[in-house]
Image: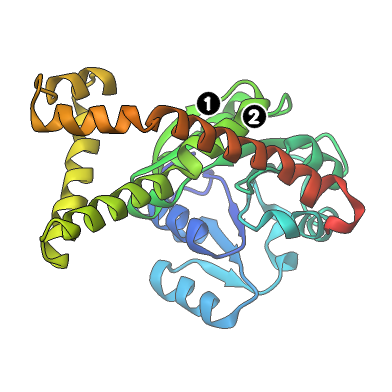
Amino acid sequence: MSCNASSDSPRIVFIGGGNMARSLVGGMIARGVSASRIAVVEPVAAARDALSRQFGVNAVESPDSVAGDADVVVLAVKPQVMRNVCAALRPLLPAKALLVSVAAGIRSDQIDGWMGGDRAIVRVMPNTPALLGAGAAGLYANARVNPGQRRDAETLMESTGLVRWIENEGHMDAVTALSGSGPAYVFLLAEAMQAAAEAQGLDTDTARALAAQTVLGAARMLTESGEDAAELRRRVTSPNGTTHAAIESFEGDGFRAMVDRAIDAATARGRSLSAEFGDSEGAA
């Protein structure tokens, strides 16, 4: 994907103008993609106006006027409406268009079937820190995605953070459980740390600020040091010190097993979404 205003850069159409679409549009604009190459289909008038004002993109109510010449179509809609969205788009899209889906649980073969078959599809699992340019996304490409389209999808998602290709689509549910849902796990930990510190006598503002900054600092050390999490943990855990006492408490309460069960539950739920919103006739 060319990050300039040239007429040979891909025409990108977003179906849905929610938070994820806004983060992707904002990221692309920041990287130099011309707003004239981007259109967003959004049924809510106020949201369309906001997209046009903030980014200068063409925000429309219906795909009819923009889908016909699209090179990349980003399906930024909820899983439960994906079938209906595909049915509406099917007669409008050129055969060469790359479809990029950010809907959790919906498989590429399901989208392909709803679109009439022989479609190039990249399935993406992003997460909410993409809104800050600090996202983590797993991408899977079906066999019809050519190298150029693969680069386009990668560049699209790199505008919001880290990208990793997943070669086995079955592993996308694990990506959903790890990074897709993962921010909520971190928020829960920070919430619990704050509450525990307040119980020890710290005021709310101080407890919240220290918990948030601790999470930020630890995350930066993990991403910037190049060291494994286990090694970083060992370095800050002095024998018989305060950190050691806390880690021993975590381990004694089965912290690792608890995390394993949580990731397993989220992975299983991701697998079930394709049947709930995709395979069954009543899902649409």
Q: Which mark is residue 165?
A: 1
Residue at 64% across, 21% down:
168
Left or right position of 236 against 171: left
Name the secondary structure under disc 2. strand
Sooner in the amino-acid sequence: mark 2 or mark 1: 2
User: Quadrant location of residue 16?
Assistant: bottom right
Q: Amino acid at mark 1?
A: Trp
Q: Residues within 10 Å of mark 2 (few under 14, many from 20)?
A: many
User: Is 204 located above or below residue 45 in the figure?
Assistant: above
Q: Report the front residue among 95 and 83.
A: 83
Percent across and percent down for residue 4 are 40, 46
User: Is 47 located above or below residue 9 in the figure?
Assistant: below
Name the secondary structure under disc 1. strand
Percent across and percent down for residue 84 are 81, 60
Left or right position of 230 against 282: left
Answer whether labels 2 and 1 touch (C-beta < 8 Å): yes
User: Quadrant location of residue 170?
Assistant: top right
Q: Amino acid at mark 2?
A: Ala
Q: Is residue 156 visible?
A: no
Q: Which mark is residue 26?
A: none
Where does label 2 land, which residue?
141
Q: Residues within 10 Å of mark 1 (few under 14, many from 20)?
A: some
